[in-house]
Structure formats: structure tokens, C-alpha cells
Image: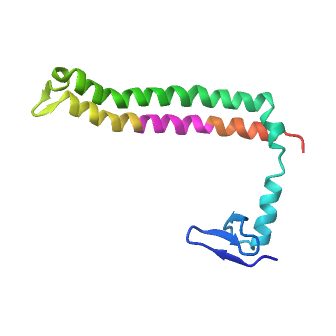
Amino acid sequence: MCAAAVNAFGTTRCLSAPNVCVPYTGLSTLESYDNMQNESRHDWERLAATAEFKTLLRAKARFIVPATVFFIVYYFALPLLVGYAPALMAKKVFGVVNVAYLFALSQFFVAWALAWLYVRAAGRFDKLAAAVIAKEPR
């Protein structure tokens, strides 16, 4: 049996086995540890070698890499344009608001849009991951 302590983050730490840390589920630490052991009985190396897992990684990379490159280019376009095309960025759109202000404001909307797109894509990734684990022979 393990003497347990719950920290401020709701994580149970087994005091007699300090390297064991499981989420607090309301179960005793020993029960939580047993559940954690049951969940980790997958042969992760064999799963990683499957075609389905490689398909999952390719699907994630097809979204994440272009989205990251796009955002980095879009983010650094503002200081580059302000530095190299100041006349364009200083052009007034209405009142005192110029193109640079609108471009800077648009970065918030672009970040939110990318986050929304990722949440949608993550749902597909989760389904692919569940399919990979479901095909694993026990």
C-alpha cells in the first residue's frame, strides 16, 4: 500500500514511490496506479510501426507543418513590411488607422482561425488514433 498526498494540481503523489504520479480520480492511489498500468499495456513500439500509425503521423504533419509555416510567415510579415515598405504600411485606411494597425489586428483573427481549424483537425486525428489502438491485438 502506498501513502499518498494530493498536491494543488489535483495530482496524487505516492509518497513511498515518489516517481509514480497519477491524476486524482477519487480512487485510492493503489487503484489509480493499477488503472494506469492497465492503460499502458499497449505495445507502443509495435503500434508505432503500423501503417495506420504512420498514416496518422502523415495526416498530422500535413496540417501542422503548413499551418505553422503560414503563421510564422504571416507573423513576421508585419515587422518586415513596416521596415521595408513603410509607405504602404503608413497608408491611412480611415481616420488615424493605417494598414499596419489593421495588419496587426488581423493577426489575432488569423491565430483564432488557425486554432479553430486545428480543433476541427484534432477531432479527425483522435479518430485515427482510436482506430490505431483498436486494431492492436491484445
How many numbered circles does the render carry?
A: 0
| Residue 102 appears in the rendering | yes
Judge by depth and name the residue closer to the eye, 74 or 76: 76
Q: Residue at x 37, y 28 (%)?
A: 74
* Rendered location of residue 67, percent (x, y): 49, 29
Residue occupying the far left of the picture: 95
Displayed quadrant of residue 103: top left
Q: In this view, does 4 lie above or below 37?
A: below
Give yes or no for residue 113 being in the magenta stretch: yes
Q: Is residue 89 above or below residue 34?
A: above
46 vs 110, left or right, is right
Q: Residue at x 54, y 28 (%)?
A: 65
92 vs 82, left or right, is left
Q: Magenta span covers which residues? A: 112-123
Q: Residue at x 69, y 38 (%)?
A: 127
* Rendered location of residue 94, percent (x, y): 12, 30
Give yes or no for residue 78 being in the magenta stretch: no
Which quadrant is the N terminus positioned in? bottom right
Judge by depth and name the residue closer to the eye, 85 or 71: 85
Q: Residue at x 90, y 45 (%)?
A: 138
Displayed quadrant of residue 6: bottom right
Overall secondary structure of the magenta stretch? helix
* Rendered location of residue 125, percent (x, y): 64, 36
| Residue 135 appears in the rendering | no
* Rendered location of residue 60, percent (x, y): 62, 31
Colour setup of the view: rainbow
Residue occupying the far right of the picture: 138
70 vs 122, left or right, is left
Displayed quadrant of residue 82: top left
